[in-house]
Each structure stands twice: as structure tokens, then as C-alpha cells.
Amino acid sequence: MAEPRPEHVAAAPRKRNRLRWLKWLAGFALIALLVGEGIYLWPRLHESWQALTEIHWGWLAACIATQAISLSAFGRVQKQLLQAGGVRVRQSKSLSVIYGSTAMALTLPAGQVFSTAFTYRETRRWGASPVVASWQLAISGVIAAAGLAVLGVGGALLVGGSVNTFTLILPIAGVLAIVLAVRYVSAHPQSIRSAARWVLHKVNDFRNLPADAGQERIDEIIEQVQSVQLGKRDAGLTISWSAVHRLADVACLGFACFAVGADPRLSGLLFAFAAAKAVGSVPLAPGGLVVVDATLIALLTSAASISASQAVAAAFVYRAVSFILVAIVGWIVFLVIFRKHQPKDLEYDIALEQREAKELHREKQANLDIPQPPTDRADPEPA
């Protein structure tokens, strides 16, 4: 047996050392950013602290309530899209997943990845097929991006700035493209199946595989897409709830300003909100820590026409509600409801895939009028 080469043995420790240095470097950069922000804001911190000590509790309660309404509306979006795919789920279940996934997205490194995987797994538990679960995630994300783009463009126009029309058209076009593609596949399954078979045969011929290799998987995907029926009512309700989700979040920021005695301009408020959300979507730090706060403070001061001390206090209140409070509630929901799901995920996924494969096979046999062969094995039950 060949002996391991010394350079291969030393490669793993060297890689670990390099990663360790990168972690230290990222930690020092974050500390330097926090210190720099503290030095920059120090002259305003005393006034901001005074504004926080004189906070209006009624506006703070309204701030918390509107953030809860925003998340509840996003839960409705998820519920409506799953319903269009034939999956019935209670609002309480949908909302619990929204809180858990939001907590992951806000607090974990690469939180969006964990959040998406968690939402996908839970919607599969409710009975959604892989295509329906993925479609729900894609369409809800694109609709949310389109709503954010509309708010940002509207705020920029009201402030008096210039905007790039492409930033508004792209997300809206993405929503229409996904919806129209799904509806076309649902209405014309045979034409899509014929085209897919032609492409599959060409690919298999190039790879020296049997002509029908992978055909069952394509038929399975088309069957799943056919189950998505996004009618006008579902589409209207989805867009309406998505609008409530965004507008309630804007109201949360506005009430945070009122809570510290500020009176922001609506145009500047919309622009600051959209810019902060856009910056927060870039995975620089969990929850957009520091970068979102700096963006909010700068734009609330310049665009919303409130003082720097009020902007610091308003950003603190808004982030305390939309970041810290939501993360705390979300992790509590996760630990109470979803913690026991995790050890059984692998065996559950295997059982679910096997059961769905058998069901699809039975449906194909029924459509072809072929009697099913007897089976001695029962379907696996999900864990």
C-alpha cells in the first residue's frame, strides 16, 4: 500500500491555519468597523440616549405590532402559494416557519442558506412536492424583491433623485416570467414533455447513455408542475399580502421615528427603508449588522430630514424590534416546535421520496390502464 506523501499530509493543517487567519481577520475588521462607527457617532450619542429615555411607549407598541403584522402577512404569502400548489396548511404553521427561518437569516453566518433549507424541508413535511416547495420559495422571494424595488423607486422619485428603470422592471418581469412559465407547463404538458424528451435524447446520445435515461425524472417534474394552479384569486391575494408585508415593515420604521420624537418625510422614509433592506441582502454580516444601521442613520438624516441624534435613536429602536426581538421570538419558536424534527430528517426524507416515487408509478400505470403488480411491502411512513 502506498505511503501518504508528506506534502498531502501537511496540506490539511496549512488549510486550517489559513481559515483561522481569515476568521481572525474578519473579526478584527468587524471590531474596527464598530469602533469607527462609535467614534463617528459619539457626538450624537448623548442626544440619542436622551431621546431613548424619553421614548413614547405608545408608538413603540405600534412599532412592535406592525412588525408582527408584517411577518404574519409574509406567512399568508407562503400559505397562499402553497395552496396554489395543492398544499393546505394552517396560518399558525406557516407563521411559525416564517419566524424560525427569519431568525436563522438574521443571526447565522450564511443565514439565507440555512433559512431556505429549513423552509424547504418544512414545506416538504406538509406534503409539498419538491417542485412546489422550490416554486414557493422562488416566487415569494421574487415578489418580495419586486415590492422592495417599487418602494425604493417611489421613494427616490419623491425625494427628487434619478432612478434606473431596469431596477424596477427586472423583479416585476421575473415574477411574470415564473408565473407564466408555470401556467404554460400546466396547460400544455404534452408539448413540454415532447420538447424535454427531444433534448434528453440529444444529451443521452452525446453522453453515450440509453435514449430514455432520465425520462422518469422529467415526467415526475412535469407532473409536479401541473399540480401548481395559480389562478387570478390566488395571484391577487399573494400580491396583496406581499404589499401588506412590505408596507407594515415601513410603518414599523416610521413608528420607530415617532417613538423618539422625530417627524420624518414619507419620501425619505421609503428611500431609507428600501436602501437599508437592499444593503442588508448582501451577506456581509449576520442581519446586515452595522451596514444596515449606518445606511438607516445616513439616509434618515439626509433624505427623511430628521436630526442625526434622532436618526441614531430611531435606527436603534427599529433594529431592536425588527432584528433583536424577531430573532429572539424566532429562536424560541424553533426550539419549541422544530427542534425535535432535526434528528429524524434523513430517515424522513428517504421515506418521503420512496413513497412519492411509488405514488407516481401507480398514477402512470392507472393512466395507461395497466393493472398494478401485487406488492408485499407497505409504503414507508414518514418519521
Image: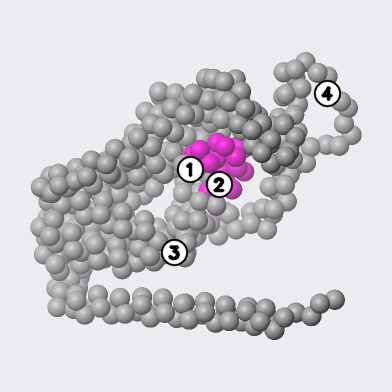
SS class, disc 1:
helix
Q: Disc 4 residue type?
A: Gln
Percent x, y of residue 283 = 40, 61
Residue tagged by mark 3? 107
Which callout, 1 or 2, points at the residue further toward the start of the chain?
2
Percent x, y of residue 329 = 44, 58
Which residues fall within the magenta stretch?
Answer: 118-137
For residue 120, which numbered disc appears in the image? 2
Q: Disc 3 residue type?
A: Thr
Q: Disc 2 residue type?
A: Tyr
Camera-nearest label, 3 or 1:
1
SS class, disc 3:
helix
Which callout, 1 or 4, points at the residue further toward the start of the chain?
1
Tag 2–tag 4 contact (CB < 8 Å): no
Residue 324 in sight in this render? no
Q: Residue at x 46, y 77 (%)?
A: 22
Q: Residue at x 43, y 27 (%)?
A: 180
Cα separation, mark 1 vs mark 2, equals 8 Å
Asked if 286 appears above or below 177 in the picture, the reply is below
